[in-house]
Amino acid sequence: MKLVVQRVSRASLISAGILKGSINRGLVVFAGFGKNDDESMIEPAVRKLLKLRIFADDRDRMNLSIMDVCGGLIIVSQFTLYARTQGGNRPDFLSAMQPAAAKIFFDRFVETCRRFYSGDIVAGDFGSHMTVEIHNDGPVTILLNFGDGKDI
C-alpha cells in the first residue's frame, strides 16, 4: 500500500462533474494498493496516517496530527502510484492490485478512517474520473509505503 499525504490549507474533490466535498485545513490522501497487499495492512496504515504529526504547533514545529487540529480528510484512490517506467516511456501498472479487489481495499480503508476519526472525511468514487483541487500548505507532502513494512 502506498499513500501520498499532502497537508492542505483547503481542498475540494469533484467526481464525474459533481462536487463531492471540500475541506479547509487538513490532509489529501492518495491511496494506491499493490497486488501483494493484504487487509491486515489497512488498520496500521490508517492509525499511522491519523497520528502523523505534520501540522504546526504554537511554536511552528510540526508536532500535531490531523486529530489534534480536527482537520478535514479527502481520500482518493490512485492506482497510478504503482506505475513502473523502467522499460520505456509508457508506464505499466502490473504491480497494482486488480480493480475489483482494489475497490474493496479502498472502501475498507475509508471505513477504517471513519471508524478511527470523527472529523470531516470526503471519499472519492473508486474508478471515476476525479478532479482534486489542492492548496498544499508548506508545501508538505509525505510518502508512506506499507508494502515493505518500513512505515508501519
Image (cartoon, rainbow, N blue to C red):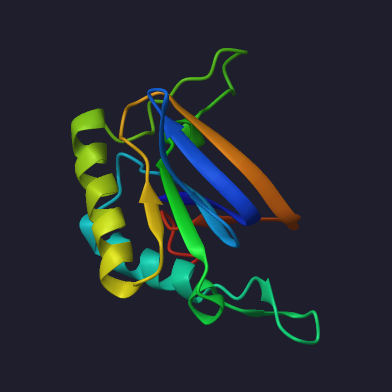
x and y, in percent, of residue 94 in the image: 38, 26
x and y, in percent, of residue 116 in the image: 31, 73
Query: Horizontal placement of 104 versus 45: left or right?
Result: left
Query: Is 55 situated above or below 100?
Result: below
Query: Is 147 situated above or below 103?
Result: below
Q: Residue lying farthest right?
A: 59
Quarter placement of the C terminus:
bottom left
Judge by depth and name the residue closer to the eye, 74 or 19: 19
The image quadrant of residue 17 is top left
x and y, in percent, of residue 37 in the image: 30, 49
Which residue sits at x=55%, y=58%?
A: 27
Query: Is 13 situated above or below 57?
Result: above
Query: Horizontal placement of 19 versus 100: left or right?
Result: right
Which residue sits at x=56%, y=13%?
A: 90
The image quadrant of residue 55 is bottom right
Query: Is 8 situated above or below 14?
Result: below
Which residue sits at x=34%, y=26%?
A: 128
Judge by depth and name the residue closer to the eye, 49 or 121: 121
Judge by depth and name the residue closer to the eye, 124 or 25: 25
Query: Horizontal placement of 41 versus 68: left or right?
Result: left
Which residue sits at x=59%, y=23%?
A: 86
x and y, in percent, of residue 150 in the image: 50, 65
Judge by depth and name the residue closer to the eye, 113 or 70: 70
Residue 152 shows up from this direction: no
Residue 2 shows up from this direction: yes
Query: Horizontal placement of 17 versus 132: left or right?
Result: left
Number of callouts in the render? 0
